[in-house]
Amino acid sequence: MNDVLKALANRRSVRQFSDIPLEKETIHTILEAGMRGPSCVNSKDWYFIVVTDKEMLHKMADVNGRPAEPLRGAQAGILFCGDLQ
């Protein structure tokens, strides 16, 4: 439990990114971590859309305003979608 609390206490937000492309394995690991999160009655009613196209990342930043500005420098963005039906 101490490791979890330490990780939470030391977490930080990153808003500036390198220009090194992400490997597919890295993206897969990030998605796996996201899928391990809890869901109501283990329904896992979510979908992930990985965006690596720079033009699309810029459009996403345009339509989502200031909080999405870091997408302009990111190598990938992940859209988390929920299925409410």
Image (cartoon, grey):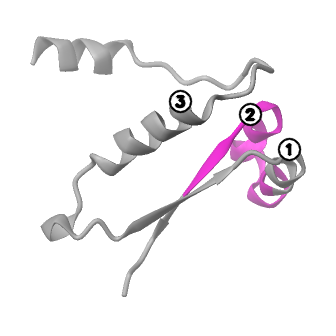
Work out which quarter of the rendered image holds the N terminus and state it. Answer: top left
For label 1, the residue is 54
Work out which quarter of the rendered image holds the C terminus and state it. Answer: bottom left
Q: Residue at x 72, y 45 (%)?
A: 68
Q: Residues within 10 Å of mark 2 (few under 14, many from 20)?
A: some
For label 3, the residue is 26
Q: Residue at x 72, y 21 (%)?
A: 16
Query: Does 53 appear above or below 22?
Result: below
Q: Are marks 3 and 2 in contact (CB under 8 Å)?
A: no
Residue 18 place in picture, x, y as percent: 75, 17
In terms of secondary structure, what is the magenta stretch mainly? helix
Query: Does 22 appear above or below 67?
Result: above
Nearest-to-viewer mark from 3 and 2? 3
Residue 71 place in picture, x, y as percent: 75, 40
Q: Magenta region: which residues?
A: 60-79
Q: Residue at x 83, y 54 (%)?
A: 56
Name the amino acid, label 2.
Gln
Report the Cα–Cα distance between label 1 and label 3.
Answer: 18 Å
SS of the residue under disc 2:
loop
Report the Cα–Cα distance between label 2 and label 1.
Answer: 7 Å
- Kindly give the residue lying farthest to the left in the view shown: 1
Name the amino acid, label 3.
Thr
- Kindly give the residue lying farthest to the right in the view shown: 55
Q: Residues within 10 Å of mark 1 (few under 14, many from 20)?
A: some
The image quadrant that residue 84 belongs to is bottom left
Residue 37 place in picture, x, y as percent: 27, 48
